[in-house]
Image (cartoon, grey):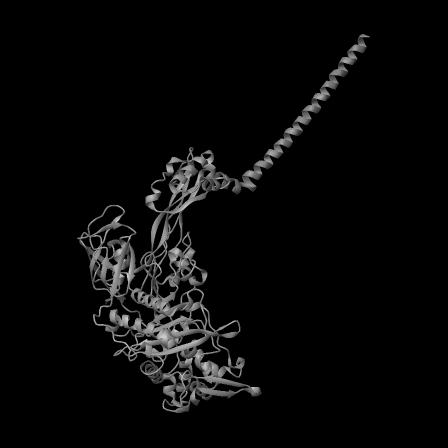
Amino acid sequence: MKLHRTHGTVGDTQHTLRHALRRMLWTKIILLLLFVVVAFRLVQIQVIRSGEYREIARRQYEARITLPATRGAIHDRNGNAIVSNTVLVSFGADPKMIGNEARAVAAYFSDVFGKPRSYYLARLSDRQKRFVWLERGVRPQTARRIKPDRFDGLIQLNEPKRLYHYDHLAGQVIGFTDIDNNGLSGIELEYDAQLRGKNGYVIMQRDGLGRKRPSVDYPYVEPVNGSTLFLTIDLEYQAVAEEELRNGVERSKAEAGLVIMLDPATGEVLAMANYPFLNPTRASYTPQPVMKNRTITDMFEPGSMFKIVTASAAIEHHLVEAGRSFSADQGTYQITLAGGKKRTITDTHPYDRLTFREAMEYSSNIVMAKISDLVGAERLYVTARNFGFGIATGIELPGEVRGELKKPNQWSGTTLNSMAIGYEVGVTPIQIAAAYAALANNGVLLKPTIVKRMVSQGGEDVFESYPQKIRTVIDKSGARQLAEFLTGAVDRGTGKGARIEGFPIAGKTGTARKFNEGQYQTGSYTASFAGFFPADDPKVVCLVMLDNPREGGYTGGLASAPIFRAIAAKVKATSDRFRKAATPLIVGKPPASVPDVTNLTLESAETILEEQGFTVEASGKGALVLRQRPAAGTSVARGATVTVETDATTRASREGYAVVPDITGLSMRRAINRLTMLQLSIQVRGSGIVAEQSPRPGKEIKKGEVVSLRCAPTAPAPVKVL
């Protein structure tokens, strides 16, 4: 029995030992497996997905704040600011940091801006987002009511905003931007990359309380501001064109209208107007069709304006002499087509016989159709192509169409005679203006351009435009002969509505029935007049087009020629262009022209002059530039010194107010510049020199209030017109 008990105790001990060893083994296996899992997880975190987790950690204690670049300004050819920038304040928030204070923040903003609290709560509700906008584009005086330090996670940013100084002036040309200063149309879109510049940024670190502080260990990248553009547009020409276009459209009850003015010696656009106008500051309220720059986007049949192509082909190929007589068939001419069909061509007035010259002066469809039979399809097509029809001009604006010019193998039996009088061909207004500029430039077709210079943030020229010759369309003698025909059209023919006594004008009317939905519309017309002045030494080419005038006559001679006459009369009376030598066609780099900086703030004047490469010397203690030397428009060597004298009599005003200056006797452009710098609104009647103003000089008014100006031409005697 004793031996039996000893054997049992040893067995139990061995069993217990084996059990303990098994448990230890399983413990080791489990620990090993846990180690493998932990090791794999560490490899996954520290090696495989290390970048992802570092980014998550970095976002918890870092914030990258964008430093927006200032968008480049846009000036006219004389250095007057058309578009610049002002600084507004925007507020954003980090919903995660705001946390439980969202209701307090919503109430705070609701009290200041008047929007319902739910508006802000909805924006702050997504805690996964690290940034949302609460308010954008707030004026500084309102923004001062918000204290960002009151709540953790509230962010205040200064944002540049576009400032359009002249409201609707050249609105479709300039275009507009969105709230983030991205160009959406016009020059703003075409040169968006150059104007926008490049944003910078700064890395901020959050401390334990979530406050952002700049880090000296992380990069700070300065923004690169956008380049400055100088357009070929002349603000005074643009103002005259828009004023007279508006008057003409309202007088004739037309649906719309446009004006283009070119310098024939350079191809530079001096004015480009569309009516109804587009105000870039209110673009979101503007109907889509009004936003279009119809001078380049719309195609139409030109009617009799296209007769210069037929006449040029006949003159260039020596097919018809000016005095050759043709039967005008008493105003009705029947043509027999293939298959025995008849086609009738009519004139507005019946004539027995007309010479080639008279046919152009009186715009005879019948005689020009007969001349096209002598010219032939191939010559007429080539001449039209040489004038630039059917080809986009390449002007620096978005949305240009090329028009439509069918090749002779696509022509029907009616195309030759139809095209000769401006039908069965689609053109754009800028193509017509460029074609008439070629005649005014002794037969040389130039590329139209609207951008004169681009200057970088550092004041260096990025590029400068020069006249670009496309081709010679007609020789010099032929161009002069055709110019004489067009002068006769104004003196004696269909263009008498554009005549100014003692001031020779060459031009051609155009009246075309509108083609819509596959047929010509009864009682719906495009009325046009294109020409140049003075006819013996052309300095300005002008095209006027009205869409469907309904009162006072629907023809180009009755509806559009009077608008041309009014524009020419005002430009002649107010512009220095007619007291200077014509701009030569140059190849080499010209000297710099001193911009007009009088009546600008000293800061603005210095910026403009330095951007154009001039050295500035200032005298006086005033806020506005009173005088400058050399005078505006003077050609000097680039880098020359311009001395500006400030107006020491300019007195200060209370915050939010401005003292109305005396601007009588100033040009409209200078007056608007001065009032704009004082943050006053402007209402202008007429054009030229300021004759009257209201309120009176010296009165203190709130900024933003309207100052009314009545302008008149410098010439006191009225221009006699016929």
Pick the quarter of the image with the C terminus: bottom left
Above or below, 79 against 680 in this view is below
Pick the quarter of the image with the N terminus: top right
In which quadrant of the rendered view does residue 386 lie?
A: bottom left
Viewer-nearest residue: 579 or 288: 288
Could you tell me which residue is drawn at 38 percent across and 90 percent down? Answer: 321
Instruction: Report x, y in % for residue 109.
Output: 40, 40
- Left or right of 326 in this view: 573: left
Q: How many labels sit on residues?
A: 0
Could you tell me which residue is drawn at 48 percent across and 75 percent down? Answer: 522
Identify the residue at the far top of this view. Answer: 2
Could you tell me which residue is drawn at 43 percent across and 55 percent down? Answer: 284
Instruction: Report x, y in % for residue 717.
Output: 21, 72
Above or below, 3 against 51 in this view is above
Viewer-nearest residue: 477 or 679: 679
Viewer-nearest residue: 464 or 240: 240
Q: Is residue 595 visible?
A: no
Identify the residue at the far right of this view. Answer: 1
Viewer-nearest residue: 692 or 232: 692
Instruction: Report x, y in % for residue 200.
Output: 39, 49
Instruction: Report x, y in % for residue 375.
Output: 45, 87
Above or below, 591 against 382 in this view is above
Above or below, 321 against 535 in this view is below
Q: Is residue 134 visible?
A: yes
In which quadrant of the rendered view does residue 105 lie?
A: top left
